[in-house]
Image: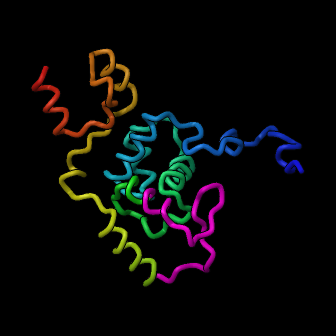
Amino acid sequence: MASPISKRGPRVGDSASLWNFTLVPGWSNEEVATLKLALMKFGVGMWKEIVESGCLPGKLIQQLNGQTQRLLGQQSLAAFTRLRIDVDKVRAFNLLKTDVKRKNGLIINEGGVLSKDERERQRKENEKDYGVDQATIDSIELEVAGARQASTALGACPDRPHSMRTKALNKQLDGAA
């Protein structure tokens, strides 16, 4: 039996990403990598700072939030708010969970709203398990839009987008040239 969605297809006003259940609908691999670095540098939920940094031009706060949910593999971001985390570690852990309810691949909450104390406990635990150290945060350089094409034209590392390079890697590459 065909689902109602497959019968009607997309309509005017429907988001294209609603019909694309891949990890990154509407996002290039470089944009995803840049978002991961931005989450490490600014923290989850710090959408205004990420947008104002200019590292992801044209992306809206709603898109940043939705993509972060897909990257972490869970719907609720409350226990990660303002935390500077390794997104890949969180996703790997979430993919191993079997005793959870999922919707479109994302872990969804089945209980009520967390109390302030419970949310804070989870945040502390998440910071301990997935937090990024200050040296790593300090080494992250996010490139402002427009400079990306120039750095590629000037021979930047083709295997690793400039926006993914840390200060240490930039020094190493500059020393090798």
Q: Residue at x 87, y 42 (%)?
A: 8
Q: Up-down: is 76 above or below 167?
A: below
Q: Is residue 113 magenta?
A: yes
Q: Position of residue 168 (x, y in %)?
A: 16, 39
Quarter of the view holding residue 83: bottom left
Q: Residue at x 35, y 55 (%)?
A: 86
Q: Position of residue 127 (x, y in %)?
A: 32, 68
- Left or right of residue 177, residue 67 in this image: right
- Left or right of residue 62, residue 91 in this image: left
Q: Up-down: is 45 above or below 161?
A: below
- Quadrant placement of the C terminus: top left
Q: Up-down: is 169 above or below 115?
A: above
Q: Residue at x 40, y 53 (%)?
A: 88
How many marks do you count on the picture?
0
Q: Position of residue 68 (x, y in %)?
A: 49, 52
Q: Up-down: is 22 above or below 161?
A: below
- Left or right of residue 91, residue 62 in this image: right
Q: Residue at x 52, y 40 (%)?
A: 59
Q: Choose between 101 and 47: the one closer to the eye.
A: 101
Q: Position of residue 130 (x, y in %)?
A: 33, 63
Q: Is residue 160 magenta?
A: no
**Stretch of the chain drawn in magenta:** 91-116
Specify the color scheme: rainbow
